[in-house]
Image: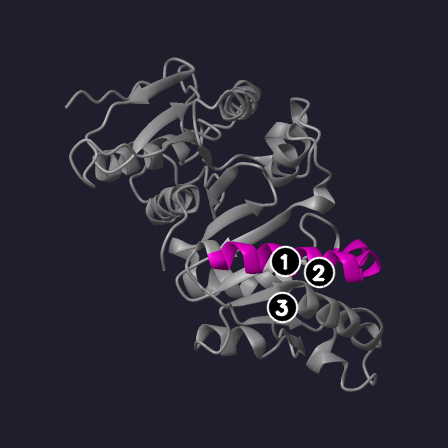
């Protein structure tokens, strides 16, 4: 087997032997290194070592001239260039999906990256508004779709809409079906404590969430639960009562997702014409180069990207 890993050029093809059967091809998956000063490059190396016999991988990015643990503008530019290159490769068909290594939002902003995150970047790259795609967190025990992503809590509440809830719910249902859930059980969170307690703590449930749940049920063709009390619905989902949950804002969904499955949760952008995944952690500059970072989430992202490209089975 000829396998190379060289981060000194824009990308290197990882030539692998497919372990799923002689002569059978697997989809080519791209992996961006992320910020080269962070844990991305070492996690990619570990992932290639452990999974390179099962997947065809292309490494996108470079790290020459950047010291681990020392974020610089040069490193941020490398990370941004890798993202742009991944779009070109997706559009040309060279890769069928992309898995992103962690980046520094602060660093990217300083070098001209005009997006709150990679989710919004890929939406724009494929001609979509950020409100047309959904950020999802998929782990072994909890699968969560977010109505809003990188907004302040005040803006997330003020911008909450029936359309946004329905969009996130439809994307969640579609993704779960691709994962093998034939008729996924989906719950939609309420916004206020205990789901508003009949209007005692707020009326967003009655005015926005309840109509959205009704419309979502019609669109998917089966019952959707909600609005459910947000302080118990994730526990119920983790126990197996629901296959997925629609969270109304970023931290409402990410806190329980990371609490339950931090080392194996995958961030997925749903609604794109391509598959895009990433691990659920950041650059961890302080940990980079010390051999402490775990590749579990990145490897889970590779597995999920391969499953979504190929249709998958639960």
As drawn, the label of residue 24 is none
Between 89 and 22, the residue placed more toward the observer is: 22
Mark 2 falls on what kind of element? helix
x%, y% of residue 130? 71, 42
Specify whether residue 171 is painted magenta: yes
x%, y% of residue 220? 62, 64
Q: Residues within 10 Å of mark 1 (few under 14, many from 20)?
A: many
- Residue depicted at x 45% and y 41%: 284
Q: Inspect this view and state whether residue 250 appears.
A: no
Mark 2–mark 3 contact, CB under 8 Å?
no
Give the residue at mark 3. Answer: 221
> Magenta residues?
153-177
Mark 1–mark 2 contact, CB under 8 Å?
yes
Give the residue at mark 1. Answer: 170
- In the displayed structure image, the side of residue 292 where residue 73 appears, left or right: right
x%, y% of residue 67? 41, 23
Mark 1 falls on what kind of element? helix
Mark 1–mark 3 contact, CB under 8 Å?
no
Between 265 and 240, the residue placed more toward the observer is: 240
Give the residue at mark 2. Answer: 166
Image quarter where the N terminus lies is top left
Q: For marks 2 and 3, give the CA distance.
A: 13 Å
Give above or below for 246 relative to 290.
below
Q: For marks 1 and 3, give the CA distance.
A: 11 Å
| Label 2 vs label 3, nearer the camera | 3
Image quarter where the C terminus lies is bottom left
């Amino acid at each position: 087997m000829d396998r190379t890993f060289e981060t000194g050029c824009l990308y290197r093809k990882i030539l692998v032997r497919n372990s799923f059967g002689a002569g059978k091809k697997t989809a080519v998956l791209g992996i961006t290194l992320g910020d080269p000063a962070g844990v991305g490059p070492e996690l990619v190396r570990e992932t290639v070592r452990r999974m390179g016999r099962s997947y065809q991988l292309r490494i996108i990015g470079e790290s020459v001239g950047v010291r681990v643990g020392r974020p610089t503008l040069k490193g941020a530019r490398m990370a941004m260039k890798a993202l742009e290159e991944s779009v070109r490769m997706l559009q040309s068909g060279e890769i069928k999906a992309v898995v992103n290594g962690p980046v520094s939002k602060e660093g990217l902003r300083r070098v001209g990256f005009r997006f709150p995150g990679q989710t919004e970047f890929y939406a724009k790259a494929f001609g979509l508004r950020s409100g047309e795609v959904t950020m999802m967190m998929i782990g072994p025990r909890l699968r969560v779709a977010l109505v809003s992503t990188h907004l302040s809590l005040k803006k997330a509440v003020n911008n909450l809409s029936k359309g946004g809830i329905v969009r996130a719910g439809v994307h969640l249902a579609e993704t779960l079906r691709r994962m093998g859930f034939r008729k996924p059980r989906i719950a939609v969170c309420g916004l206020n404590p205990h789901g508003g307690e009949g209007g005692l703590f707020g009326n967003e449930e009655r005015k926005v969430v309840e109509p959205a749940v009704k419309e979502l049920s019609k669109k998917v063709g089966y019952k959707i639960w909600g609005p459910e009390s947000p302080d118990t619905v994730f526990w119920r989902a983790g126990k197996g009562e629901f296959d997925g949950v629609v969270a109304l804002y970023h931290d409402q969904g990410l806190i329980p997702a990371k609490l339950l499955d931090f080392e194996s949760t995958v961030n997925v952008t749903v609604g794109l014409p391509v598959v895009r995944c990433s691990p659920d952690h950041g650059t961890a500059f302080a940990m980079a180069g010390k051999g402490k970072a775990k590749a579990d989430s990145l490897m889970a992202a590779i597995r999920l990207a391969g499953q979504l490209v190929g249709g998958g089975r639960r």
